[in-house]
Amino acid sequence: MQGNGKAGPKDNLTRQVPGMRRKLTHVEISALYADNPIVQNLVDIPAEDMTRHWFTLRMKDDQLARDIMGRLADLKAKDAFKQMRMYERMRGDGFISLGVTQRNKFDLQDPLKLDNLLSVDYLHPFSSMKVSELLINNDVFSSDYGKLENLRISRASRSGIQTLATESLVHYSRVLHDQTRRLEDEEQGISLLESLYDAITVLDTSLWSVGQILHDFTFKVYQSKDVENLTKEEKRELSMIMDFMFRTEALAIIGAEETLTKQTTPVSGIKDLLDFVWDYIASAARMPKSVIKGQEAGTLAGAQYDVMNYYARIISAQENELKPLLEYLIRMLLWAEKEPGGRIDPDTIEWEIKFNPLWSVDSKTDAEIRKIVAETDQIYLSNGVIGVDEVREARFGQFGVSNDFKFSGDDAHWQGVANEVYRAWKENRTHG
């Protein structure tokens, strides 16, 4: 008698409990990635955006900076870091093994001593599939709390059909580790696909449903009083013949009292449902729909604030997550005796990693911005904030037109510029 009332045993909403975590296995993750191109975009695109334009190494010795960048190219560091971030998003943890030559014999479980390096020989990206155990410092009163100390790595080599599998305890200083999502009571990171699993399932269902709708979008209805007198075999034969004829011929020949109509599947409201699925995935992945769908990388058209915010998050990830790992690798190259420059203590020289701009605007927007910048310079000149020579040097320099004034900030940046111009104008107006 109670039926499906609120909070009753038959209430579907009550029976659906949030927080029922589905922990994906490596096999399930591999299947999702291999089968679904949208999953591939969710995993690959941010990793590609983080490393696509790479970085510039600034040093007082320009030749040394170029040599080190050349060594990074030889080591295929750019591709290795991209693969590491892809593994982090897909499986929760991404690693790069640091193959080095040292002066003395060493074990992998020994800490890597930078002042004992001769050369950096290779960089091999791998995922948590190769790691059987992560040893994390869980002492809350330790300065290294939450940091990786050692990891147990599966090392397998195959010769023909025979496989030799061994495990080695490796010190954390001999690998680069990328991990951004981890629960406090767990060691390994959380795959991005776990939190997106329900949305991916709904998206896959949507694709199948739309396919079914398109397959049966239109169908014909044949009405005749003589159909009632047909046997099952005659109905089957008639259906087959008429289906063939009406699919291949534009002319239908029927009796005077017979009718043939075409029915269409109603699709009103489907767009709203599909948009909801896309909005949910974009929100959960923190990626604009246009980026997930494959918008040309690094290009903005007009005020695409959602894409600008996405690139701002990529810049933040570069600075907070990628930069420390790159700095550690460059310090290794500087310390290594047989690398460019010989043995150099990184702390005795000035050097800096500067990530290259991630995006540019289209030609129309760029022209509008150049006009705004020119008008801003005119206001500066009119109010005596800067001189003509300063504008010429800042905008053109000795190498022609500079790209430094291209739009690369956000609304707050431009609001700050506007406030500064207004303040200068107001002061000059006040003082005559």
Image (cartoon, rainbow, N blue to C red):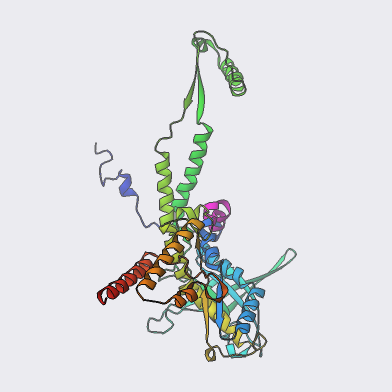
Look at the image and tell me in which quarter the C terminus lies: bottom left
Count of picture labels: 0
Does 300 sit above or below residue 377?
above
Residue drawn at 36 percent across, 71 percent down: 382
Query: What secondary structure is the stretch in magenta mostly built from?
Result: helix
Q: Which residues are magenta?
A: 29-40
Q: Could you say where residue 244 lies in the image, as x and y percent from the top left?
A: 61, 22
Visible in this render: residue 127?
A: no
Based on the picture, tell me whether residue 39 belongs to the magenta stretch.
yes
Look at the image and tell me in which quarter the N terminus lies: top left
Nearest the viewer among 77 and 415 is 415
Nearest the viewer among 295 and 2 is 295
Farthest residue toward the right?
Answer: 160
Based on the picture, tell me whether residue 242 belongs to the magenta stretch.
no
Nearest the viewer among 419 and 55 is 419
249 relative to 162 in the view: left or right: left
382 relative to 35 in the view: left or right: left
Residue drawn at 53 percent across, 33 percent down: 215
Nearest the viewer among 26 and 37 is 37
Residue drawn at 57 percent across, 90 percent down: 345
Q: Could you say where residue 193 lies in the image, as x and y percent from the top left?
A: 48, 58
Does 68 sit above or below residue 222?
below
Q: Could you say where residue 318 lies in the image, as x and y percent from the top left?
A: 49, 71
Residue 102 lies in quadrant: bottom right
Q: Could you say where residue 27 lies in the image, as x and y percent from the top left?
A: 56, 58
Visible in this render: residue 337?
A: yes
